[in-house]
Amino acid sequence: MILRAAMTAAAVLAFVLPAMAQTGKATGAMLRGLDKVSGTPIDFSMKVGDTVELGRLRVTLGECRYPTDNPSGDAYAWLVVRDGNDDNTTFEGWMIASSPALNALDHQRYDVWVLRCTTD
């Protein structure tokens, strides 16, 4: 499990770090959540620092970055996801809009992924 987490972190860093040198910081992000039991997708907008509840999950947006040469292009968001009132973190890390499976939330009921950064 530790080796898998280290390999995933290395893959994300190899993909994200070169691109982050040429990115701008956004004030928020648009995310999509999916309740896998009911099949209901939910789009929600967040400001940096906000926490949104999606069913039992609490999703906090730490940062959102986008390519400066293509503002409507790929988004990279730092998310912290907690399950219910538990202080244990279910997910913490960068999610990439174009590659949501690269560093995905592993939850039995919910999926969450980044759609794009927002600047308003």
Image (cartoon, helix red, strand yellow):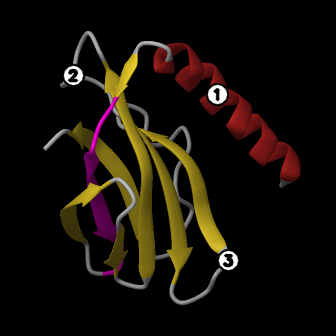
Q: Amino acid at mark 2?
A: Pro
Cα separation between marks 1 and 2: 21 Å
From the viewer's perspective, tell me whether residue 58 is left or right of residue 89: left
Q: Which comes sooner in the sequence, label 1 or label 3?
A: 1
Task: Kindly indicate the quadrant of the structure image that contains residue 111.
Answer: bottom left
| 24 w.r.t. 75: above or below | above
| 106 w.r.t. 2: above or below | below
Residue 101 spot, x, y in % from top left: 49, 42
SS label for mark 1: helix
| Pointer 2 residue | 71
Task: Kindly indicate the quadrant of the structure image that contains residue 115.
Answer: top left
The circle on residue 88 is 3
- Look at the image and give the residue range highlighted in magenta: 25-37
Q: Amino acid at mark 1?
A: Leu
Cα separation between marks 1 and 3: 23 Å
Looking at this view, name the residue that lies furthest to the top. Answer: 69
Cα separation between marks 3 and 2: 34 Å
Which residue is at the front of the view, 50 or 2? 50
The circle on residue 13 is 1
Decide whether residue 40 is among the magenta residues. Answer: no
Question: Residue drawn 72% across and 30% down?
Answer: 10
Q: Amino acid at mark 3?
A: Asn
SS label for mark 2: loop
Q: Residues within 10 Å of mark 1 (few under 14, many from 20)?
A: some
SS label for mark 3: loop
From the viewer's perspective, tell me whether residue 120 is left or right of residue 55: left
Question: Residue drawn 18% across and 25% down?
Answer: 72
Looking at this view, name the residue that lies furthest to the left. Answer: 120
Residue 112 spot, x, y in % from top left: 39, 59
